[in-house]
Amino acid sequence: MTNYERCAALHNELLELGWTGSGRSLDDLETNTWFEIWGQEAEDCRVLLSDDLTAFLERAQIPKTDDEYSLFFYVYGFAPPKRLWDTFDWRFEEPEKHRYLTLLLANLGPSHPDRLAFDQETNRAIMQMSIHDASITLNGRTPWFPLEVVLSAWLEMVDVGKIQAVEETVEVNEKFDPWICCHWNQDMVQETVEAFSALVDSIEARMKDQGMRVTDADQPLLLDASLEAAHIPHGFARSFLSQARRPSFRYIAPGVSIPNQDSFAQQPFFSVEYEEQDEDVDEDELVIKPILLFASSSNVNLASEDEKNHPFPWPYNQLLSFPAGLYLTESERSAGHEFEDSARFVLPFGVGGNGFARTSDGLQIGDHQDEQDACCADRIADLYQPGWNPSIEMHEVRLVKILESWRGMVERGDWTVSAEGIQDSIDAFKEADTEQNWQKFVVPVSW
């Protein structure tokens, strides 16, 4: 913990945001520290705690309340002294027996939940949904991050409204008082619309520099009639497509087209049956199928045994032939941890087999994370993906991050611009698995 005072300040800011966001007054917030709450049991742990971690625990505040109160949506609060080393002490011998510990306990997750793990030697942390995830986080390749990076990511999620503190009377499918996870909101839509607009502006600026005429269509990406014909429900996808401006050119990325008003309704995965969902299902219980936003003219053709390479889970992996392109992923509104802006960029060929392509966590695409030895493999839909998320539960990359990456490719001159937009073919993405250019296709670590 390079700055235990800053870490404590970030922790306490998160506590106060939850408290006031749930309708409580800071005047009523009474707190103790970890050492004050656990008394002698905590004092006995001092000899096993680093100086930085001790200083942090002496400053981080815990509310004195009988209510079930969580520090954040993903974590309940500090582990008690007797739980600190449950996950790790049996894995190591002295002198590293107490190096790793569970700092914050889980709110949700699998049958053997863990949560935020902390390395006292490096002062770095990482999220573990389950105690079994240690085989991934301790594989020697998965990066851990300073605690302040994790806490800052949580605060950013609150700032954009992805995670919100609400009053006790608010009822949702999954809530960890006072926190709920919003599947989407207008701030997230606006952030993505602005990223798309910046990408379009960058392409148009280069068209103008070459003396090409640029016209303003003065239309959204898709008209309401097209969205209705495609049966796109109210939510992130519909809001983005109806608010982002439609450019006059055709190609937004190599071999990837702006959606066509007439053909957009031909969504490949909408024909896949998802159990027996009632057509009149409540909007809050809706299952949203993968949505093809920007299509390639190339098709993906998978073999039935190539399940690991399919971009989507069951039942969508029953469909083995479909267009390549940029998709929003499946989403269930009845679930607590969902991202309607999660995306997968699906290629008609695999990348990763050369050993250069990487996910955001720095691991090779196709790596078997839970094994000690690194490996790589061709994958059609892992480009731009985060890999292991250090701060929250796993999910696919957010659409805004792919659009920002594409803008960088345009502004650096990595892609060629013509009158139709991006001139390069979809084969340009094979550069992601080359020694010279793989870094350009990696999205920075984020929540």
Image: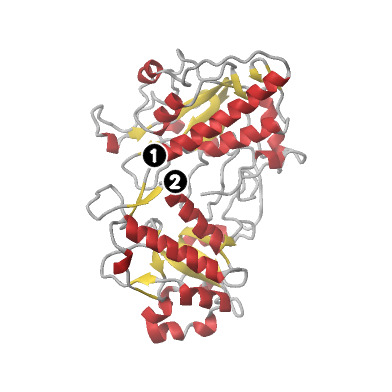
In-front residue for pair 208/105: 208
- Which is more N-terminal, label 2 or label 1? 2
Label 1 neighbour load within 10 Å: few <14, some 14-19, many 20+: some
Mark 1–mark 2 distance (CA, rounded to whole Å): 9 Å
Would residue 280 be visible to someone looking at this image? yes
Label 2 neighbour load within 10 Å: few <14, some 14-19, many 20+: some
Which residue extends farthest right?
Answer: 436
The residue identified by callout 2 is 160
Above or below residue 261? Residue 4 is: below
The residue identified by callout 1 is 185
Q: Residue at x 48, y 82 (%)?
A: 45
Residue 219's spot in the image, x, y percent? 47, 17
Q: Secondary structure at mark 2?
A: loop
Above or below residue 253? Residue 395 is: below
**Quadrant of the image containing the N terminus:** bottom right
In-front residue for pair 30/367: 30
Would residue 113 be visible to someone looking at this image? no
Residue 176's spot in the image, x, y percent? 32, 57
Residue type, numbered disc 2: Val
Residue 20's spot in the image, x, y percent? 33, 59
Q: Residue at x 61, y 57 (%)?
A: 143
Q: Secondary structure at mark 1?
A: loop
Q: Residue at x 45, y 23 (%)?
A: 268
Q: Residue at x 58, y 49 (%)?
A: 445
In-front residue for pair 327/242: 242
Residue type, numbered disc 1: Asn
Above or below residue 51? Residue 247 is: above
Residue 380's spot in the image, x, y percent? 59, 34
Are the two marked residues, 1 and 2, in contact with CB atoms closer than 8 angstroms?
Answer: yes
Give the total of numbered labels. 2
Residue 223 marker: none
